[in-house]
Image (cartoon, helix red, strand yellow):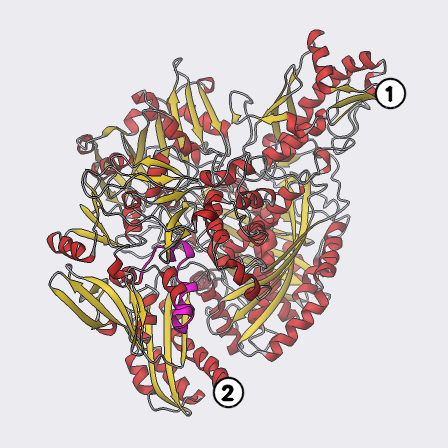
Amino acid sequence: MTRTNYDGASASSLHGPLADRPANPAVGREVPHEAAALHVTGAALYTDDLITRTPGVLHAWPVNAPHAHALVTALDVSPALDVPGVVRVLTADDVPGINDAGIKHDEPLFPTEVMFHGHAVAWVLGETLEAARQGAEAVAVDYEPLPSVLTLTEAIGAGSFQGARRTVSRGDADAGLARAHRRFRGVFEFGGQEHFYLETMCSLALVDEGGQVFVQSSTQHPSETQEIVAHVLGVPSHAVTVQCLRMGGGFGGKEMQPHGLAAVAALGATLTGRPVRLRLNRTQDMTMTGKRHPFHAEWEIGFDERHRITGLRATLTSDGGWSLDLSEPVLARALCHIDNAYWIPDIEVHGRIAKTHKTSQTAFRGFGGPQGMIVIEDILGRCAPQLGISAEELRRSNLYAPGQATPYGQPVRHAERLTAIWSELQQRAGYLDRVAAVEAFNAAHEDTKRGLAITPVKFGISFNLTAFNQAGALVHVYKDGSVLINHGGTEMGQGLHTKMLQVAATALGVPMSTVRLAPTRTDKVPNTSATAASSGADLNGGAIKNACEQITERLADVAARMINCHPADVRFVDGVVTGIGFADRQLTFAEVVGAAYHQRVQLWAAGFYRTEGLHWDAERMQGEPFKYFAYGAALSEVEVDGWTGAYRLRRTDIVHDVGDSLSPLIDVGQIEGGFVQGTGWLTLEELRWDTTDGPNRGRLSTQAASTYKLPSFSEMPEEFHVHLFERATESGVVYGSKAVGEPPLMLAFSVREALRQAVAAFGPGGIEVDLGSPATPEAVFWAVEAARRGRPEPALAASAASEAYAAGNHSGAEVSAVSGSYAQA
Amino acid sequence: MPQESAAAQHGGTGVGSVSVNGRPLGLGPVGGHVTLLDWLRSRGLTGTKEGCAEGECGACSVLVARPDGDDRTRWTAINSCLVPAAGCAGQEVITAEGLGTVDALHPVQREMAVRGGSQCGYCTPGFVCSMAAEYYRPERAADQHATAGHDHEHGPNGFDLHALSGNLCRCTGYRPIRDAAYALDRPADDDPLHQRTRRPAPPAAPVTVTGDQGDFVRPADLAAALRLIAERPDARVVAGSTDWGVELNLRHRRAPLTVAVDRLPELRACTADDETIDLGAALTLSEIERRLDGSVPLLAELFPQFASRLIRNGATLGGNLGTGSPIGDSPPVLLALEARLVLASATGTREVALADYFTGYRQSVRRPDELITTVRIPRPLAAHTAFHKIAKRRFDDISSVAVAFALDLDGDRVARIRIGLGGVAATPLRARATEEQLTGAPWTREAVRAAADRLATEGTPLDDHRASAAYRTAMLRTALLKFFARTRGEVSA
């Protein structure tokens, strides 16, 4: 039996390198989502849909603390037990294991110290949701309010930080800045983002006859949900099974945050012996669960006479909220992506995590990448007019070139794709004509202006934490030739299961219709990584392919005897098994499987994959943490109404590199969806907390769909063209593909930069445009007003931070406390 | 599809049934607090989803059979999370499960499935229902020719994208959903739901439900409704329930008695003569939009900006004025139109000017025993009108500032101007100082600039999560400047 080497050539000619595709593969075909027919008919089941199929379910409702920071001095559950229908109230005293919902042991599941407004201090179980809610209202809690830290500015001022501080550096940033022809510096504070998966958090827990705890959960990380449930219950992991049928969206929000909720449900089920359903409603979900980290950035940059970046010095401060959660790896990715697609020879970037009395900020599509990249894109957008060149030229002339490496020491392989994509995009979108048309429009319109911008994306693929880059799969071939696959990844709409069906069909050489996929559960594939970091298809695809190839290798021996050829010459294509040169001896896959069964050949296999070649020194922030980079660029055109600041996204063109696409319809969907979600973050979605000293201090004011607006049809580009970069085979990845989940989100910078261009057109030109983020109509309006006055003015939201920065770190002569943002050195 | 539903209960025990997907389904012991969404899900119809429970996301969208004139039915998409299930007794409801099956997809479902219109799939059943309503909209074929290629919000098949303005998708970025919508053909002749539109909608049967989940009554006529609310000051009056449903779901308010007035014939007239246009307070905004058909331009400008199609299919003017919210979008418009309200009680009727109606935050001169029956708009209508809604999002958002103008010019002078404002005070209000300053003044850039400065001082805008006070003030000012720029174009044309 031959062994497949996953880093390249195979020892067998039966299986080529990981990237090679066999004849007529199922991968690469444009197929709809595997559950599309279930989705559109309402037949697809989500966790909460299971409750009407589960008799005797109890419903859980939290007791939310009305303080941003307080001590719980007394908790009396007895009034709740008097409410008809209330069955039990869960408190810290009920926890048999460890009272903690996280992996850093800084997230008490039932806290004695309230750390954010809405923190659940107890949970009430009721026969109905109404009873549980009324019970929660009846629980008597005494609080001793404590001082709270809410904004990044407050946290920085108070020195309220958590976790490790990291630095990415190369060369000598001071020397780089010193040799610059022009230097600029500034401060930029930008907002977070609510995931707003349409399906809110939900878990349904029950205990079976053997005491086994079974939790159905809307989770991106079933194995970790399992671990947390087990340690809260004080049982080994083998006593807990977690299943995720599918999620109604995840976007990173269900990577860490479901665990504690699942543990509460499991605890309730264990204590009552009845199934417990814990579903957050939208208000609870927005109030209680973490979001994308808002950031604060201070920076100084230098350019040479040819407008090349000479050096960058920056400090990024993320708002981690009350607990550490995933804040450290999010910050690491931010630090690793501040370069975006640009060569910065001398650089020093410091990162730190603020601790504030807010929800625990967590993973969100891009995972810090967007927060790093927005800083450099904002800098280039602001500096270009000062340098007297177009932002397009400034960006293009600083793109990485082949042979260069990132500040953390990873070679930028295929850097030439950046310039190739840039040119192709300009050509496809008719860039030069469009620039002229925008200029003509702006000359003819006093109160409406258009803007056009192009921005690049370079995004590293793999978990920064090397250990996570592994995956398992289980492939069963039944005697009739039908196939059942199971893998460790979860389906949240991204089309992972569709791709995995295509991978299995390709690797086994069978029609897709003969392959079925079973729901993700921890008793099938153990110790899985989160479905996150865009890695789902790379990792699980590798594992499935590995399992399938174990099976086809065994089947090849059987078939070779039937055909009378060498096993390495056996080919599996579309359910037909042949040998090279034996075209007349065609066997069906089922025939070979049947023969194999009678010869007692194992027809199922567990597959495994580990990404080769990764190494990362998390302390020094050096190494090669990524298997490869995903590249792309977007060109967007907007129109701004100068009376109101309202705008429309007229057109977006995208060229994006997904390697050789596993599933083009899915990949285009990821690109478009990521782009619009990124546009929401940058232009519309605004999280506002009550930062007054009033009684609601710390309360999220935008905790509903009516106050937190995500993109609707009115925000999608009126014209939208997505093109997959061609001839893009990625060696060393399953069937030559690339990850696609996160990178396209950052294509949305083109919208923000186009808005900046349009705003600039209201003014005399040649001055910076400082634009708040999100660039809401109000933020755009103030920027237009500033442009019309012919001088920069920071967005309102950033002004306080700018003043603090100016006062604390720089002499006022160069950095004006009002204009705040930057001054030329 | 058999649509003759089981007899609804005419007052009494609270046991009735709803025709769901063509089959009668007993309501069971369902009180006034139970929404159609929760009831459907409790009966195992879990295709309909809860995304926000406040009529913002559309994941709960279902189709209901509503009257379209006297002899036809219009499949109307509504937010099932907002309406009481009890109010659906005797009605016909179609959910995503009822449109088609995995093996026999409905044309809307097929287009959505093959074009990548679903990713996570959670919003999808709601999109499918909203899209199906537009698929069956009888005017769509005519619009096909009127709007083809005119803008990005209307498909070549006459599909009005605003039909989906109340549906949110977090995954797709909407492009494939738009493509699916624009690819839809006309319904086949033998399509059962299409055939159903040719017969009358089920009548709104009187309903009485009592129980520990709140009582629910749909009175038979206005007199019965007025008697009931006179007897029961604790009653909650609902029409589309688009405001009360939010209170119920998000703020957990409970009313011992809910009284539905949405189908009272006395509240559903739409008449016009030389003097006035009378709009029944319980007509839905969608119905008014269709009946007026652009004849009141200021209202025509309002409707597409008022919440979403799903909401407009339930919401009424009576409700929007009855709640008295300072950020409702209809009051500024109706103030500029100098609308008057007819208020009825068991003891008689009276008419009040809308400008005199609001007395404080969500307070009005309406007594608890009174219902708004009619919104009366005097004629002639002003020659130049505009409605400016300032919000973060163009589709389905709540305004931070709303300004409505109604202007008549006499030569180049202002003969008469009425300005209605929303979002800048505890009540909607008329910008009387600005109106006074402009009346008789020349309609010139200089005079308008001065008036715009005055307009910016009207009201007492606040800072909140929607906008800063400074922005609201600025928007008052620029609204008049923008209106001037627009009328100057109209006058010179």
Q: In which quarter of the image is residue A399?
A: bottom right
Visible residue check, residue A824: no
Residue placed under numbered mark 2 in the picture: B492
Residue B485: x %, y % from top left: 48, 81
Q: What residue type is labelled 2?
A: Ser
- Indicate the chain on which mark 2 is placed: B
Visible residue check, residue A710: yes
Q: Which amino acid does label 1 sit on?
A: Phe
Q: What element carries label 1?
A: loop
Vertical arrangement, residue A554 with respect to residue A165, above or below: above
Residue B129: x %, y % from top left: 46, 47
Quadrant where the C terminus of chain A lies? bottom right
- Contact? badges 2 and 1 (CB < 8 Å): no
Same chain under badges 2 and 1? The reply is: no
Q: Is residue A410 left or right of residue B14?
A: right
In the rendered structure, which segment of residues is drawn in magenta? B292-316
Residue placed under numbered mark 1 in the picture: A582
Residue A666: x %, y % from top left: 62, 42
Q: In this view, does B294 lie to the left or right of B180?
A: left
Q: Is residue B314 magenta?
A: yes
Comparing B5 with A510, the one in front is: B5
Q: In which quarter of the image is residue A790?
A: bottom right
Residue appearing at x 35%, y 33% in the figure = B43
Comparing B313 with A617, the one in front is: B313
Q: Does the magenta stretch include residue A10?
A: no
Q: Is residue A379 left or right of residue B329?
A: right
Quadrant where the N terminus of chain A lies? top right
- Indicate the chain on which mark 1 is placed: A
Comparing B453 with A160, the one in front is: B453
